Image: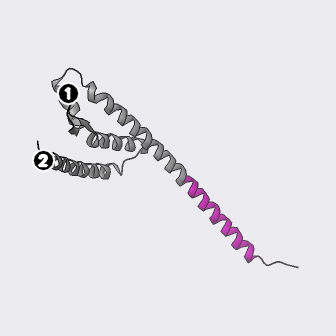
Amino acid sequence: MTQESYLLSWGIYLSCAGVLLAIFWYVTAKMGGRILRIGMRVTASVLLLMPYSIGEGYSELAPAIIMLAMESLFEASPQRVGVPFAIVWGIVLILSLGWGVWRAARTKSLQAEQQLHAERDELLEQSRRIEPTL
């Protein structure tokens, strides 16, 4: 395989993977359960986007899901690809869930702050309406 065809095939694969991920994210956008939605999106992203070496002594990479399938079919144990794949999936899942929790806490904090400002503004407006009596 020439360098041009290798890069072209990766370009086509990544374009198709991007379209699939966009469709998947659109489909899961209306799903309930934030944690389940994040987990499904992370799993789909890692499945489609993680590259892996095709073998020792080769510099070329292939999608890890294809390498995992090939080793599962033609070799006794797919551990060469399966273990790194599981580690990457776990790390990305933990980071994504952590990001989601942080973002939810920040949104809640900002909403509480906006509510406090609105209540303060309302109290200030009420105090301006009341005329001091002497």
In this view, the residue in front, 36 or 50, is: 50
Residue 23's disc is none
> Is the residue under label 2 in contact with that under label 1 (CB below 8 Å)?
no
Among the 4 quarters of the image, the one containing residue 56: top left
Name the amino acid, label 2: Ser
Badge 1, how many Cα within 10 Å: few under 14, some, many 20+? some
Q: Which residue is mark 1?
A: 71
In this view, the residue in front, 110 or 12, is: 12
User: Colour scheme in the image?
Assistant: one colour
Name the amino acid, label 1: Glu
Q: Is residue 7 left or right of residue 123?
A: left
- Residue at 21% over, 37% down: 59
Q: Is residue 67 above or below residue 75?
A: below
Q: Is residue 126 left or right of residue 110?
A: right
Q: Which residue is mark 2?
A: 5
Disc 1 versus disc 2: distance between alpha carbons?
Answer: 24 Å
Residue extending furthest toward the top: 76
Magenta stretch contains residue 101:
no
Q: Which residues are magenta?
A: 108-133
Q: Is residue 117 above or below residue 98?
A: below
Q: Position of residue 7 (x, y in %)?
A: 18, 48
Badge 2, how many Cα within 10 Å: few under 14, some, many 20+? few
User: Which is in the foreground here, disc 1 or disc 2?
Assistant: 2
- Residue at 73% over, 77% down: 129
Q: Position of residue 61 (x, y in %)?
A: 22, 39
Element type where label 2 sits in the image: helix
Element type where label 1 sits in the image: helix
Q: Quadrant of the C terminus?
A: bottom right
Q: Is residue 17 left or right of residue 99?
A: left
